[in-house]
Amino acid sequence: MDAAGDILIRIDAWLFHLSNVLVGVAVLVTTVLYTPPGTVSLDLLITQIDPFYVLVPLSVLYACWSGAELWRWVNGSELL
């Protein structure tokens, strides 16, 4: 592959990792803005669950995990 192809592959991988981090942050911000704690509850067969307390830790975990993958990719020697 030529140099232009290598650059395009590197940019594609950068955008892939960056978009994953931004998805986690977007879910966190959306959860805080639109479903603050105590405003919405899901009725299950046994109990009620507030989605805020489920989505916030998951979105923070996903954003941190994606950020760590981005950091590992940037500091790694492999192209992809």
Image (cartoon, helix red, strand yellow):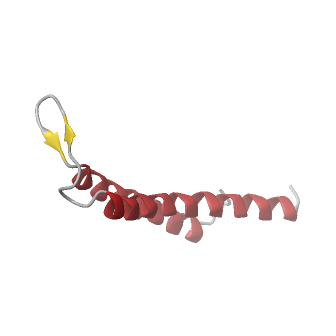
**Position of residue 21 measured from the top left corner of the image (x, y, whole percent):** 49, 62
- Is residue 54 toward the left or the right of residue 11 in the image? left
Is the residue 62 above or below the residue 75 in the image? above
**Position of residue 26 measured from the top left corner of the image (x, y, whole percent):** 45, 61
* Front-lying residue, 12 or 42: 42
**Position of residue 80 measured from the top left corner of the image (x, y, whole percent):** 65, 56
- Is residue 6 toward the left or the right of residue 12 in the image? right
* Front-lying residue, 36 or 26: 36
- Is residue 4 toward the left or the right of residue 50 in the image? right
Q: Residue at x 83, y 58 (%)?
A: 5
Q: Residue furthest front?
A: 39
Is the residue 20 above or below the residue 51 in the image? below
Q: Residue furthest top?
A: 45
Is residue 65 in view? no
Q: Residue at x 21, y 59 (%)?
A: 37
Q: Residue furthest left?
A: 46
Q: Residue at x 35, y 64 (%)?
A: 33
Is residue 67 in view? yes
- Is residue 40 toward the left or the right of residue 66 in the image? left
Count how many numbered circles sit on residues in the image. 0
**Position of residue 67 measured from the top left corner of the image (x, y, whole percent):** 46, 65
Q: Quadrant of the N terminus?
A: bottom right
Picture quadrant where residue 19 is located: bottom right
